[in-house]
Amino acid sequence: MNITDPESRIMKTAKGHLQGYNAQAAASEDRIILSAEVTQDCNDKKQLLPMLKRTKENLAAADGTLRMGTLLADAGYFSRKNLEEAYSAGLELLVAVSSEWKTRGRRTGGGAPSSPPRSPAPDMEEKLRSPGGKELYRKRGITIEPIFGHIKEVLGFRRFMRRGLEACGNEWKLMCTAHNLLKLWRYGIDNVHKISGALRMAEEREKAMLFAA
């Protein structure tokens, strides 16, 4: 129990444990955040389907013609239930498979089996090993990972300033909105520079033609 924020929970991180929340985000290939949520659950497995649902809703609200392509997710989101429900909904997934089959071999006192047991869900490992799967899954490291790095390092957001699940959820969405605005602004500025450069080159060519005449 945390008397400062009773709604927070103990979260396991790469550097140990901390009291807080689990921040989730789904983004497009060009690093625009499409949905963002904060949960009390330290396990990501239960967040995959809700995040997919919210992403679809947000895309539909923004533009009815937008459709989700292939979702890329790390092993924290892998479960047979997630795969089966996503496929039944017509969603395309590439999710890193956990090494539970190796753990099972150690628990039984024997070595890891020569190959993972077949899952009732489609064989995700085989899909990830395919040339197309490898190329597509490699994009995860250059899409969602830089977003969290940008929010932490550039925007300096490493801890919630507010207390309570709803308040922290709103704070997280505000930071994600700030990230999107900066991303879109830079995209717009880059286009302005390109257009300005093209106009300058056109003017210089026109002047050169006049002098030549």
Image (spheres, rainbow, N blue to C red):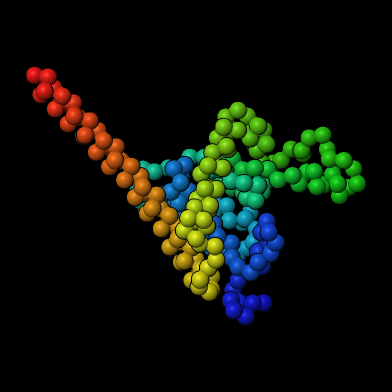
171 is higher (above) or lower (below) than 94? below
- The answer to whether any part of residue 165 appears in the image is yes
Pick the front one: 100 or 123: 100
Which residue does the image show at 45% across and 51% down from the upper left?
A: 33
Give the x, y percent position of residue 183.
Answer: 39, 49
Which residue does the image show at 50% across and 60% down from the upper left?
A: 156
Q: For the C terminus, give its image quadrant.
A: top left
Question: Is residue 144 toward the left or the right of residue 57 in the image?
Answer: right
Q: For the N terminus, give its image quadrant.
A: bottom right
Which residue does the image show at 39% across and 43% down from the upper left?
A: 66
In this view, the residue farthest toward the right is 109
Give the x, y percent position of residue 111.
Answer: 87, 40
Which residue does the image show at 56% across and 52% down from the upper left?
A: 49
Pick the front one: 64 or 196: 196
104 is higher (above) or lower (below) than 24? above
In this view, the residue farthest toward the bottom is 3
Q: Quadrant of residue 121?
A: top right
Give the x, y percent position of residue 51.
Answer: 52, 54
Q: Quadrant of residue 40?
A: bottom right
Question: Is residue 103 toward the left or the right of residue 47 in the image?
Answer: right
